[in-house]
Amino acid sequence: MFGKIRQKMDLFKEMGKLLQDENVRALLGHPKFQELMKDPEFQTLARAQDFSKLAVHPRFSSLMKDPELAQILKKIAERRSA
């Protein structure tokens, strides 16, 4: 029981760290990403944290080809690997 609580707390801590990154905030606040978040199928995958299915979701894949969003994602990846 406490393992699940600890996992959730760790997830909230990680989300808090991510949200401190201006690039993550830029991605989440981008109008095209906001539109994607209205997609019920995408919402379900996001809630389930099914990252493998999220990555190949057609609308998400399409957005990742957008030059502006791709640049934001590149910055996020660079910071996370540093």
Image (cartoon, rainbow, N blue to C red):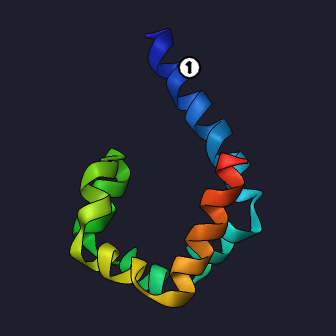
Going 29% across and 66% down the picture, which residue do you hit?
42
Name the side, left or right, on which 35 lies relative to 2.
left
Q: Secondary structure at mark 1?
A: helix
Residue on which the image places disc 1: 6
Residue 18 horizontal/vertical position (percent): 67, 53
- Say if residue 31 shows up in the picture: no
Q: Quadrant of residue 9?
A: top right
Going 48% across and 13% down the picture, which residue do you hit?
3
Q: Quadrant of residue 28?
A: bottom right
Going 61% across and 75% down the picture, which residue do you hit?
72
Q: Quadrant location of the N terminus?
A: top left
For the image shown, how many numbered marks are present on the structure? 1
Residue 13 horizontal/vertical position (percent): 67, 37
Residue 33 horizontal/vertical position (percent): 47, 80
25 relative to 51, above or below: below
Name the side, left or right, on which 60 lies relative to 68.
left
| Residue type, numbered disc 1 | Arg
Crowd rating for badge 1 (residues with CA inside 10 Å; few <14, some 14–19, many 20+): few
Name the side, left or right, on which 16 lies relative to 6.
right
Viewer-proximal residue among 64 and 2: 64
- Say if residue 39 shows up in the picture: yes
5 relative to 57, above or below: above
